[in-house]
Image: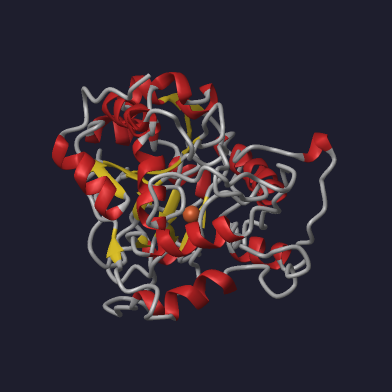
Amino acid sequence: MAVKYEFLTLQQIEHFLRYGWVSIPECFTREQAEEWTKDLWTRLGYDRNDPSTWVLEKINMPTLNTVDVRDLAPKAWKAICELSGGEDRVAEISRHWGDNFIVNFGSEKLNGRIVGPRELDNWHVDGDNFIHFLDSPNQGLLVIPCITDVLENGGATYICPDGIAVVAKHLLDNPEGVTPYMARKGEEKQFHEFQWFCEQIKNSDKCNLFQQMTGKCGDVVLMHPLMMHSASRNALHIPRVITNPFVSLKEPFNFNRSDPSDYSLIEKKTLKDLGVDSLPNWKIEGERETLNPGRVAIHERMKEMELRRLAGENIGPVGDSGVEVHREIVKGLVWEKPEPSMTAQNV
Ligand SMILES: [Fe+2]
């Protein structure tokens, strides 16, 4: 059935097809953001008013609770559904947004220091728990709710819109599938972290457009799943809070629809950046597999500490960012199917 657009404006649709992202303003209020994050400082063991207690430059917190996006941010949900080609294509799990806040504090040392996008070493696409194909339904959209104002050079996520074509081409050329780090089978030791992505970002024949995803508290940025992005350095030392809910689809993306009006905007953007109208002969040639990312174990440990702090125990902050430790763990990543009980969809 042809996709209907009742929420997104023509301008927003055109913007998404051009840049691969769209920002939906005022999806929730500052009061809702305050309520959502009321335990954040206790969970961390940091003093909101004393920057000397902010042990880490940036932290990816674990999920303790979830909210229904249809209650918190109904506008964002409408946009998510329209970009995905209709609510009936969106998996139920996508309705739950976790309180796995990503806080970028910056540091005294970084204060006033601007770091350019090609100097960043954290470039990636989301989805560390599955083997990636061009049509993978696991990561249908990348979502950034701005839970504080997200200011220019204040720790805003950097994105590379012209990199969508680069990632899409790599996946098109590798129908056997690649790891979350874009490694083909046998290349896992070479590309086990952010190397593949950083190589593309540094190549000015491929990647030249960089943008910071700034926004006001309550805005929700929706991005194409193949959008390369990186955490940035916060030069302002004002804590920036976001989270990164994912959207999963019930079925893989379909790049060979008989009626072109059935393509979702995400599918249209993938095809546009590949320079084709459809992919009639393309199909996956590997098995769809889930992986067990190291962050699951890290988050379990962090969660235990947060629950103890919430219960009133004074155990202070912990220097465990969930990023640095994750880096240590992914170095050993090999392409092995995990035990089914060990798999977890982006907790
Ligand atoms: Fe990410």
How is this picture coloured?
A: secondary structure
Q: How many marks?
A: 0
Q: Quadrant of the C terminus?
A: top right
- Residue 82 in the image, given as x and y percentages of width and height: 32, 28
Look at the picture and state if 308 lies above or below 189: above
Q: Is residue 257 visible?
A: yes
Foreground residue, 129 or 33?
Answer: 129
Find residue 307 and report its horizontal and vertical position in percent: 61, 37
Q: Position of residue 236 (x, y in %)?
A: 27, 68
Residue under the point 50% across and 56% down: 125
Q: Which residue occupies the foreground of this view, 254 or 52?
A: 254
**Residue positioned 73% across, 70% down in the render:** 187
Above or below 169: residue 129: above
Q: Is residue 80 left or right of residue 282?
A: left
Is there any visible trace of residue 321 in the rendered image?
A: no
Give whichever of 166, 142 is nearer the camera: 166
Q: Residue at x 68, y 46 (%)?
A: 296
Q: In which quadrant of the rendered view does residue 4 lie?
A: top left
Seen from the viewer's position, the closer of residues 173 and 73 is 173
Position of residue 229 in the picture relative to residue 298 (left or right): left
Dividing the picture into quadrants, the one containing residue 54 is bottom left
The residue lying at 41 percent from left, 58 percent from top is 164
Q: Position of residue 339 (x, y in %)?
A: 85, 40
Q: Is the N terminus in the top left, top right, bottom left or bottom right quadrant? A: top left
